Each structure stands twice: as structure tokens, then as C-alpha cells.
Image (cartoon, rainbow, N blue to C red):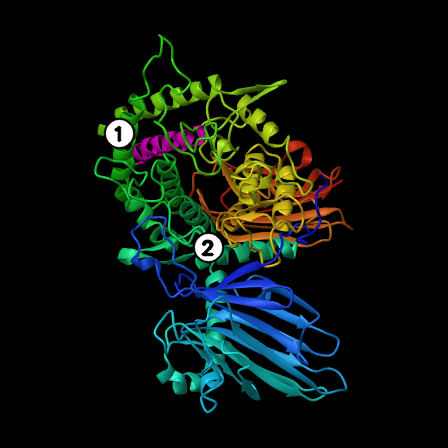
């Protein structure tokens, strides 16, 4: 597959396309579903704060409205949708016709979801524009004017399904309001040639009919602007990336914003991330851990820590960290994903007190896991079974199956469980827990040896190569998470035969749009998140930036123009076959992480810069940079620019003055054939990777270099 050159959403799945709007970390979420000609607004009046911690119980979406802009009584000929300013979690929805235009901008404010309405008549004839707001799917919700002609016609009240006088929506700024049906508000404007008009549709979170006078007088423009500014200021705190491809840069910030959209208050005062905004709107350990990692990588250390307290606290007195009372029960990998979040937070902050607080959880978890593995260390007919020394039968998730059974002994969960033992040992070494070191070292070495033997003996032999299955010795189920043995768990080296073979196996089934198939629940579908989280990251670790770039562009183009993704989908463009949430968390967090790692990635005692940069990003003379990127070695910044006319590349990087950084490589990724042939400036730098890299040994402070390209 050739390297794509742009983000064009050519493989977007079928409408509706969803964007959820809210304030950061807010439970007042509004689901916006886009399709040609109309916008669906939906929400719940329920709250995850009332559900048991960690349980897969979700609020029911009990209210929805259909907004249909009209031109002279008919729907507009064409409509488009995108994020405001390219990346904010705010909808810009345009309705287009040669005769007139309407634009809806929808944001989540402090007290209400706000629809800002603009319209324009550019022609030479008057036109009637309207916004039809209709309650759909139930008789709940009514316009008081349908019942009483003297009552207000600019509002819908609940009637049933809630307190009867609860305000669902209120229209403001229209010339006239009518109730064409019992469940509809019709906002109308007469526009003369060249005239522009505006208005509002307000969805209050908790307001009743007696409050309508205050609601009509509220300063909605101020609340609307405050909502936009809150998001701008939040995202401005992140590590600043400047990427020559605007579509990729927007994707990073759009996905980063959605990590805060997916977070909200839950029971007992916690804030946590949920894997989706509707179907999976329940906090769990897995996606929430990846969110914590991504936030730490972006510089949101406090938010990363506070947003992952709940999963870390869900541990039984005997040490079981797999949440036997919650969603993650029987998924033994939960301990590893929790340990990963702890490890990344410590390495990017060097907060020793934080590690000290969490160390007891790591310790008792390893002890508990060792007791479980002892149950499987039993010979059968004098021989070790393929599952010898592994965790007992559990639940696979992610399409993992033992034959047709969702329950079995799964290698990905054992990979993560062994990784938890590794992190416990590392923490003990860092904290000098001498009294625990021998015990934890023995647990880790024993569990790792059993796992490696199970992967070796249970590998599947294909013609000329072997690969890691989900279940030792069986080909059933998905390919989900097996490559985590390489990254981030680091249990197998990058050149290991089984890693090479597993990548080869996954890439034997690639869709026309560049997505591997059977990475999740749908055997003939794509789980776009896993393309990035597993496969693209593995290629990066193995030094193959070109493959990572291809998968990034493919994954972005399988999303919607809103930079949102359903959980899984069919492989063809416009596929109507989707599963899970319409706006799922795993892909945006995978996008944010892989873009960061493509530009700044730790390996062993060193740092790769721009390892996964596209070979086309610098050819036009644009700047590629990252400012304030947290790493294991401290905060790092860099910028580089190529002058094609002068055949010179100039780069500047700033490394911490005090760190353990042993080396840093700036990857010079230009079109094939172009490479560094000499260095014109920059003391201490050397040419590596056959001219595709510049390396510094133990860099400290600011370094600059100028390279001659040929």
C-alpha cells in the first residue's frame, strides 16, 4: 500500500457520525448524530454516580430530538459536519444551498447544551428559513402551545418520562414559533436578500417551566464563549506539536480533547474515563489506563493521576486486582494494565511518593497471581500441558476465544499479568524494598519462564514462520493484544521470531483500506484502535516508521470527519456494519499515543525523535516540532526544518540538563534516496542509520545541528 499523503476520511463508515459535546470531565453530555439533512441530539437524565464502582452498568439515553433546517419549507440540499476550529469537541454543522445557508454550532456549556444558529440569504429573493426541532421516538415531550394556543410555543416540556414541567429545549431569537405537531417547536425567520440572522436553541441540563423567564434572559453568548475558551485553554496546556500535515495535527488535539469528553464523575467522588459515550458509558480499568498514559505523555500529570484512582483502588484484601466485583472480573490482564499506568506516571514525573503509595498494591497482586499460577503447575500424564504455569481460566474479551468459548486460558491476559510482576519488581528496586526483592524476583522469573515456554510450545506453525495465538496451540479467536508481548510489556525482544511471525500473520489479512482484519470481535471487520495500539506501535519499536505512518493514515481515514470512530466496523468504505459505541474511546486514545510516539519515543536508555514522521512532511520546507514533551528523561523539545532549494536541514533540540539520557537520535525522514551526507554544524553529533539519523551521545541542554542533504 503506498504511503497516503493526506487525511480525507475516504473510508469513513456510514452515517450517523457521532460527536459528544460537554465540558471537560462533565457528566452533562449531549450526543450529536450527523446524517445528511439533519442532526439528532440525545442525552440521559441518569448518571453513572449512582452505579456500583467498576460495574458494566450504563445510563439509558432517554431523550432525543431531531433538528432539521428548512429552506422555504424543504430540507437543505447538502450538509457538512466538522469540529469547530478543526479539533475542539464542538460541532460545526453547515446546511448549504445556492439560495441560502444555515450553520449550527453546538457546544456543551456550564448550564446547558447550546446550539448557536447563523443563517444568510446571499441571493436576490426573500426566503423563509426554519429550524424544526422535533421530539422523536416517543410521545414524551410536548409543545404547550399544541394544547393551549395561548401558551408559549418556543419550548418543549417533558410531560412524561420525567417531572412533567422539565424543560427539554427552548428556542431564542426567531421571528416566530409554531407547533406543527404536539412534539415540535418550529423556529422561523424571513430573510430579505443579503440579510443575515441568528438565534439559539438551548437544552438546559436541569431547568423547569417556572424558570423560563430567567432562562430567556440568560447571557447565552457569554456562556457559549466561555465553553469554547475552556477547551482552548485546556488543550493549550498540552505538549505542543506542530505537524506539517494539518489533518494529523488536528487529529492529535481532537483525540486529546475526547479523552476529557469520556471522563466524568462516578460514585464515591471519583472521576474516571468510560470506553464510550453511550453503549460503554461505564468506567473500567483498561481504556482508562491508556487514557492515563496518554495524559501523562501530553503533560496532564495531575489529571492522569486523579482520573485513574478508582481502578487502582479496586483491589480485594487477598490482592486480586482483576475487580471480581466489577467489569474486569476474570480478565487477568487488568493487573498489568494498572501496573502500566503506575509505571508510566512514575517515569514521566519521577514522583517517588506516588510509587511508594501504590507499591503495596503491586506487591500483594504479585503474591495473589503466584498463588493462582500454582494451580496450573500440575503435570498431566507426566508432562506439562500447554497452559502450565499460566493464570487459570478467565474471560478473554476483545474477540479472544477458546474455540467457541469466551472463557479459557488466554496468552494476552497472561502477558499483561506477567508484566504486572515485572513492574512490581522494578518498583521494589527503585524504592529499595530489600525485604521483598528476592520474593518478587522469583515470582517474576518463574512466571516469565512459564509464559515464554507456553508461547513457544503453543505457537502456531505456518509455512515458514510461527506466530502467537490467543490460546496456546489454538487458532480460534482474534489477534487482539498478542503484540503487547513486545510493546509496552517488553517480554519479548523486537527481533524475536514470534514477534516477527505474529506481525506477518496479522498482515496476511489486510483490507483494501489498509486495516488488518480479525483484530477484535468481528472476524471480517476492523478494530481500528488495535491497528495503532498493537501493530503500528510494534512497527515503531522495530524501527519501521514507514509502516507506522501507513497505519496512522489508514486509521484516520477510517474515522469520520469529526475524528471519531465506532468500536469495530466492516472493511469497506461507507460500511453500515458497526459494533459497540458510535464514539468509542480506544481509537482516539490510540491515535494520541501513536502520534506522540512517532515524534518522541523512549527506548531503553535513549530517545527517538521523529522516528515515525511521514517522509512527505518536510519536503515543502515546513517545520516539524514538539515543545514541552514529557519523557522518562525529563521534558524535551525539538524543531527541524528542511530547505529543499539549499538541500540543508536545520534542527534544534532542548534536553534536560540533569537526566540519565544516554543518547538521542533525530530521524531524518525524507523521501527515499534523500539522506544526510555530511554535518555542516553541530558539535558532538554523528550520522547514523545510513544517513537517516543524527545521534547525540548523552545530550544535555540545547543542541543545534545543520545537515547537508543529498
Residue topped by disc 2: 259
Secondary structure state at the residue bearing disc 1? helix
> Which quarter shows the N terminus?
top right
Image spot of residue 324 (x, y percent): 29, 40
> Which quarter shows the C terminus?
top right
Q: Which residues are magenta?
A: 411-430
The alpha-carbon separation of the residues under discs 1 and 2 comes to 33 Å
Q: Quadrant of residue 622?
A: bottom right
Pick the front one: 212 or 422: 212
Image spot of residue 71 (x, y percent): 67, 78
Q: How many neighbours does mark 1 have within 10 angstroms: few (below 14), some (14-19), or many (20 or more)?
A: some
Image spot of residue 639 (x, y percent): 60, 51
Q: Quadrant of residue 410?
A: top left
For the point 59% across and 41% down, the residue is: 525
Q: Extreme bottom residue here?
A: 150
Secondary structure state at the residue bearing disc 2? helix
Q: Looking at the image, is 291 positioned above or below residue 96?
A: above
Residue topped by disc 1: 367
Q: Is residue 422 magenta?
A: yes
Q: Earlier in the sequence, mark 1 or mark 2?
A: 2
Work out whether residue 494 can be spotted. Answer: yes
Q: Is residue 248 magenta?
A: no
Q: Quadrant of residue 121?
A: bottom right
Q: How many neighbours does mark 2 have within 10 angstroms: few (below 14), some (14-19), or many (20 or more)?
A: many
Q: Is residue 168 left or right of residue 641?
A: left
Q: Is residue 589 left or right of residue 71?
A: left
Pick the front one: 578 or 261: 578
For the point 40% across and 61% down, the residue is: 25
Q: Is residue 26 left or right of residue 255?
A: left
Work out whether residue 705 can be spotted. Answer: no
Amino acid at each position: 500500500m503506498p504511503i497516503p499523503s493526506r487525511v480525507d476520511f475516504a473510508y469513513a463508515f456510514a452515517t450517523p457520525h457521532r460527536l459528544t459535546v460537554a465540558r471537560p470531565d462533565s457528566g452533562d453530555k449531549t450526543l450529536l448524530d450527523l446524517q445528511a439533512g439533519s442532526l439528532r441530539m440525545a442525552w440521559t437524565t441518569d448518571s453513572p454516580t449512582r452505579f456500583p464502582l467498576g460495574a458494566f452498568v450504563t445510563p439509558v439515553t432517554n431523550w432525543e430530538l431531531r433538528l432539521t433546517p428548512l429552506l422555504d419549507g424543504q430540507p437543505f440540499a447538502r450538509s457538512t459536519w466538522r469540529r469547530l476550529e478543526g479539533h475542539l469537541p464542538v460541532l460545526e454543522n453547515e446546511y448549504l444551498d445556492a439560495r441560502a445557508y444555515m450553520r449550527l454550532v453546538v457546544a456543551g456549556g456550564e448550564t446547558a447544551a447550546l446550539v448557536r444558529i447563523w443563517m444568510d440569504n446571499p441571493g436576490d429573493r426573500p426566503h423563509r428559513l426554519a429550524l424544526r426541532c422535533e421530539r422523536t421516538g416517543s410521545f414524551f415531550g410536548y409543545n404547550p402551545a399544541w394544547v393551549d394556543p395561548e401558551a408559549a410555543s418556543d419550548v418543549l416540556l417533558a410531560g412524561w418520562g420525567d417531572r412533567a414541567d422539565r424543560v427539554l429545549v427552548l428556542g431564542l431569537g426567531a421571528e416566530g414559533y409554531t407547533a406543527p405537531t404536539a412534539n415540535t417547536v418550529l423556529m422561523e425567520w424571513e430573510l430579505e436578500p443579503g440579510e443575515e440572522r441568528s438565534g439559539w436553541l438551548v437544552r438546559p441540563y436541569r431547568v423547569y417551566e417556572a424558570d423560563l423567564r430567567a432562562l430567556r434572559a440568560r447571557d447565552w453568548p457569554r456562556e457559549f464563549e466561555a465553553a469554547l475558551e475552556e477547551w482552548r485553554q485546556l488543550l493549550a496546556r498540552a505538549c505542543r506539536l506542530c505537524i506539517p500535515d494539518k489533518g494529523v495535527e488536528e487529529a492529535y488535539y481532537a483525540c486529546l480533547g475526547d479523552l476529557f469528553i469520556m471522563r466524568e464523575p462516578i460514585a464515591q467522588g471519583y472521576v474516571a474515563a468510560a470506553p464510550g459515550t453511550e453503549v460503554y458509558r461505564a468506567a473500567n480499568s483498561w481504556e482508562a489506563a491508556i487514557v492515563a498514559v496518554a495524559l501523562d505523555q501530553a503533560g496532564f500529570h495531575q489529571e492522569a493521576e486523579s482520573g485513574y484512582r478508582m481502578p487502582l483502588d479496586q483491589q480485594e484484601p487477598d490482592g486480586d486486582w482483576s475487580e471480581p466485583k466489577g467489569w474486569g472480573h476474570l480478565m487477568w490482564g487488568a493487573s498489568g494494565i494498572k501496573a502500566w499506568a503506575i509505571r508510566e506516571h512514575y517515569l514521566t514525573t519521577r514522583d517517588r511518593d506516588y510509587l511508594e503509595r501504590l507499591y503495596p498494591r503491586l506487591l500483594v497482586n504479585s503474591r495473589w497471581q503466584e498463588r493462582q499460577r500454582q494451580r496450573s503447575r500440575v503435570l498431566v500424564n507426566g508432562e506439562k500441558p500447554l497452559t502450565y504455569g499460566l493464570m487459570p481460566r478467565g474471560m478473554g474479551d476483545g474477540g479472544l476465544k477458546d474455540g467457541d468459548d469466551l472463557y479459557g486460558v488466554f496468552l494476552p491476559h497472561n502477558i499483561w499479568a506477567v508484566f504486572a510482576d515485572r513492574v512490581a519488581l522494578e518498583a521494589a528496586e527503585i524504592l529499595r524494598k530489600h525485604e521483598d526483592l528476592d520474593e518478587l524476583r522469583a515470582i517474576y522469573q518463574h512466571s516469565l519462564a512459564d509464559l515464554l515456554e507456553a508461547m513457544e510450545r503453543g505457537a502456531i506453525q505456518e509455512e515458514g514462520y510461527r506466530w502467537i495465538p490467543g490460546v496456546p496451540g489454538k487458532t480460534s479467536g482474534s489477534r487482539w493484544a498478542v503484540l503487547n508481548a513486545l510493546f509496552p510489556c517488553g517480554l519479548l525482544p523486537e527481533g524475536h521470531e514470534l514477534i516477527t511471525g505474529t506481525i506477518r500473520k496479522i498482515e496476511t489479512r489486510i483490507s483494501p483500506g489498509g486495516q488488518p482484519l480479525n483484530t477484535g470481535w468481528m472476524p471480517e471487520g476492523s478494530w481500528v484502535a488495535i491497528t495503532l495500539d498493537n501493530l503500528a506501535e510494534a512497527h515503531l519499536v522495530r524501527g519501521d516508521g514507514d509502516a507506522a505512518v501507513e497505519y496512522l493514515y489508514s486509521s484516520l481515514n477510517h474515522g469520520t470527519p469529526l475524528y471519531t470512530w465506532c468500536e469495530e466496523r466492516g472493511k469497506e468504505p461507507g460500511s453500515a456494519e458497526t459494533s459497540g459505541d458510535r464514539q468509542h474511546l480506544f481509537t482516539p486514545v490510540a491515535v494520541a499515543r501513536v502520534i506522540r510516539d512517532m515524534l518522541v519515543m523512549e527506548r531503553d536508555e535513549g530517545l527517538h525523535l521523529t522516528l515515525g514522521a511521514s517522509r512527505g512532511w518536510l519536503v515543502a520546507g515546513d517545520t516539524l516540532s514538539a515543545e514541552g514533551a514529557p519523557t522518562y528523561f525529563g521534558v524535551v523539545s525539538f524543531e527541524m526544518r528542511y530547505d529543499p532549494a539549499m538541500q540543508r536541514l536545520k534542527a534544534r533540540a532542548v534536553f534536560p540538563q540533569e537526566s540519565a539520557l544516554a543518547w538521542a537520535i533525530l530521524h531524518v525522514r525524507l523521501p527515499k534516496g534523500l539522506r544526510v551526507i555530511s554535518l555542516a554544524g553541530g558539535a558532538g553529533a554523528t550520522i547514523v542509520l545510513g544517513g537517516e539519523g543524527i545521534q547525540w551521545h548523552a545530550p544535555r541542554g540545547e543542541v543545534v545541528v545543520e545537515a547537508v542533504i543529498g
